[in-house]
Image (tube, rainbow, N blue to C red):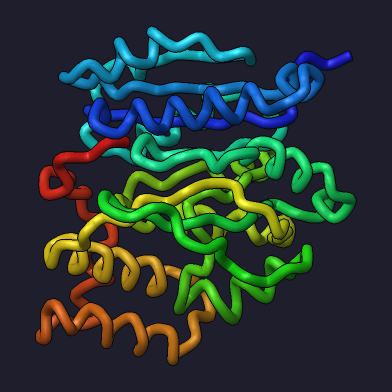
Amino acid sequence: MSNQPLLSLAVPVYNGSKYLPGCLDSLEAGVNALPESDRNLLELVLCDNHSTDDSLEQLKARNFRCATQIIQPPAHFENRTLNWDHALRASKGEWMVMLHADDLLAPNGFTEMFKAIRRKAASKAALVGGQHRVFTATTEPGGAVPRWPMPSLVSGEALRKKILPSLCVFPPFLIMRRSVYEKVGGLDPQYQLVQDWDLWYRMLEYGGNLYHPGVFCHWLSHPYSESMGQLFSREMMLFVSRLSDTPTDALKFQLAKIRTHNATISLAGLVAETDAEPKVASLEPITQ
């Protein structure tokens, strides 16, 4: 019998001491809510990107009732996407999901994740998603979204052609099939903000997205600065411009968004920057 976990959850961390207690508490509660048979099929990978605060000490102080790795990359990655990828590649599960250090696992989140990946339709899926709740620094988690009450398998081809060039409909907590993640080459460090969007687009070439009507996680909403908004728009435009057979409407839609931050920028100018070295200093502080 294989000792491979069925599910791995990776938490990339960088100077996340402000949020880590809540995140780790939620993971501990989620693990404890599982029967022993499922705890034996679960793995946690806690990946500290050489934090300068006490994040690593907080991770080491925990004792989860499931397989757990506490790791660091060989040296600090200036580009956080590399730390995300390092955490995911260190995991061993057939399925894997990432939880950011400032977000929370929902009560019974692991239970819902196991239900989702055990659905018969999961055999045809590259990605498996569920519901989430949004909270802020001053508000409790709201209602579960999306509100659709029925499980459904959506064609990867349809999502790639009709939805993802214009809009990302997924939260960060998509469960990914490991074999497909590896086939597409994992996360692309060219991106700092749309790296998961780009990844999911590539993964959906090899399967659909299964939606499960159960809450996986709680998502912390942060204020969005003007500089972050501009960087997001620029990355999104670069992502869309790289797609084969990109719909003209999608290009126009993304260009209109970025021009709210820079009225003179052109598609040609953005495409010319595709191979430029990513700039990461403007993203500090980052908790992943």
Query: Residue at position x 33%, y 80% from top?
Result: 254
How far from the left and from the top, in percent, is residue 8? 62, 29
How far from the left and from the top, in percent, is residue 255? 28, 83
In the image, is 91 to the left or to the right of 140?
right
Query: Residue at position x 60%, y 57% from top?
Result: 131
Q: Reply above or below: 166 against 191.
A: below
In the image, is 94 to the left or to the right of 16?
right
Task: Work out which quarter of the rendered image holds the C terminus and state it.
Answer: top left
Q: Reply above or below: 255 against 130.
A: below
Q: Reply above or below: 197 against 83.
A: below
Query: Residue at position x 61%, y 51% from top?
Result: 215
Name the one closer to the observer, 186 or 105.
Answer: 105
Task: Work out which quarter of the rendered image holds the N terminus and state it.
Answer: top right
Name the one closer to the observer, 271 or 70.
Answer: 70
How many numbered marks are there? 0
How far from the left and from the top, in percent, is residue 222? 26, 55
Query: Residue at position x 41%, y 35% from top?
Result: 84
Residue 225 placement: quadrant: bottom left
In the image, is 67 to the left or to the right of 86?
right
Name the one closer to the observer, 166 or 274.
Answer: 166
How far from the left and from the top, in percent, is residue 90? 52, 22
Q: Reply above or below: 260 against 279.
A: below
The reply to whether residue 182 is visible in this rendering is no
The reply to whether residue 28 is visible in this rendering is yes
